[in-house]
Image (cartoon, rainbow, N blue to C red):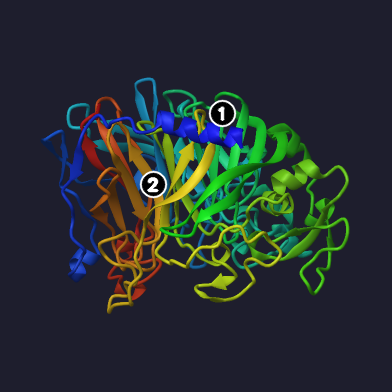
Amino acid sequence: MKKHLYALAAVAAVSGTASAVTLSFEGVKVPQTDQEKRSILASPQVTVDGKSYPIGYHVIARSGQRIGKGIFGQIFDKEGKPVYNKDGSVKISNSNDFASLIKKGEKLFMVSHFETRPAAVYITELEQNRETGDLKPLWTRNIDFSKYNGLWVPCAGSVTPWNTHLGSEEYPPNARKRDAQGNIDKYYAPMADYIGGDLKALNPYDYGFVTEIKVLDEKGHTEAQKHYAMGRFAHELAYAMPDQKTVYMSDDGTNGIFGKFVADYAGDLSSGELFAAKWKQTSATDGGSADIEWVSLGKASDTQVRAALDKRPLFDDIFEVAKRAEDGSCPAGFLPSNYRAEIECLKVKEGMETAASRLETGRYASMQGATVEFAKMEGITYNPQKHEAYMSISRVEKGMEDNMKRGKKKDKYDKGGNNDIRLPWNHCGTVYRLGLDAGYNVVKMQGLISGTPMPKDADGNSCTLDNISMPDNVTFIPNSDTLIIGEDTSYHQNDMIWAYTLTDKKLTRIQTTPYGSETTSPYYYPDVNGHGYLMSVVQHPFGESDEDKLQNPDEAHAYTGYVGPFPVIK
């Protein structure tokens, strides 16, 4: 108890620092006309300490665009050959996602995810007008992940304090379902294109990790890594804290975990200790709140886990499986898991603890008693002024309810688990405040702002239009009081990006996106050669809804760009 009280006192001691500036955006309206709904609307002006600056949305590149000798978003196989669609056309991904800005010497580069199967990450050199801040692409090329058997569904990301691109692999394939032909399901099947059609040449354990990309020199040479030591689950985003050792990881699955990795050495994520959160609920109101404890999943290194991977393990090499009793209990010697809402009784085979913790992290965390009930965890960001972090959860549902599914009785998502989280269903989602101790250890989690459900209107909106809906990624503007919240929602016809002022709890809509697209990975860069940028990617227009409104194929190309440029905010 004394230790817990000390942690709370430390939170209070480092919180509450006054913001350096006042910042406000000129808001944008909800799109009304068909033209507005197929366009990108963005705030035209930001005011900093009473002085106004013109901003807007600026496109750097669109998927399928030729930039130098490369085509932005083109997909390649393991041999570096183009992948083709069934109609014989070259495969281009319209699923642009996170895009980082990385300075190397006098050069500026952008590293961009394409969230497909097979996937791609591109490096693009940018030309910056030092006077106006305008960014233009000079050349682009695909980054090779062939030594890792390719890349899988890279979603959100971040930039580390040591200036590297930290990426992700979302929704890893369920290795238990792999059949003799190497198949798992329709979602996994497209990976055959990466390997010449033979899924048996792949192992599902190759996918589901945090990735890191270093820009090595001013020519744009890169080094790509998968950090096996950080665990395998549905990584939405990994965010490194300023101590350069503590990294928080969100799980965008159903019945997922909240992960933490503490590296052995600052700026080196190749070895360390992995943890999963334990939610100790203190309230069910306003999105809920809890004290957070951390369950250790042990220490490991990339080298150790890669050695296990090189043996091409199968699920049955790691676990024994027993049948669960009618009352939900497991036989002696077996532990329960409800990861992904799959109720299982498992035993780790002798000598396979490291493989279990890093290749089956969600299952292993559940067996160790961690909370495996989180639903669609998304972005994470840090506020240095208040020494606190924020994380969004798109929908408070299923495992986060109390033996419910969308407000109706159903025990599937809590059966076989702890039922630690017991909150009212809210399909519009919640952004949470993460309280930190004097270091960077999360000790509290509390609802900060939640979306508001409403009856579905004629346009399909079922979350109020003056509030967030299914919050996705978040970013904080340093030296201000402003949290940026993006959406990945089915409940606003047009997804939106919001500026949320922490002190007065004011929401301002600052961007909207076309029909059927997501506002993926807003990320703020406070000072790139004297200019600030809010990166903003518009993923797969007309791809998730309103497909019938597509008037020509060019409209479907995704946008990678930014809101800004901003003045440097000090």
Give the amino acid at mark 2.
Val
Report which quarter residue 387 is drawn in: top left
Instruction: Tell me the residue that label 1 is attached to.
Output: 245
Left or right: residue 278 versus residue 109 is right
Q: Secondary structure at mark 1?
A: loop
Quadrant housing the C terminus: top left
Residue placed under numbered mark 2 in the picture: 474
Precedes in sequence: disc 1 or disc 2: 1
Label 2 residue SS: strand
Q: Position of residue 457 (x, y in %)?
A: 29, 77
Is 327 left or right of 428, judged from the image as shown? right
Tag count in the figure?
2
Quick one: 416 or 309, which is closer to the camera? 416
Q: Which is more toward the observer, 79 or 29?
A: 29
Residue lying at the far bottom of the rendered structure: 458
219 and 504: which is toward the camera: 504
Q: Quadrant of residue 421?
A: bottom right
Q: Residue furthest left?
A: 51
- In the picture provided, is 364 more to the left or to the right than 565? right
Asked if residue 400 shows in the view, the reply is yes
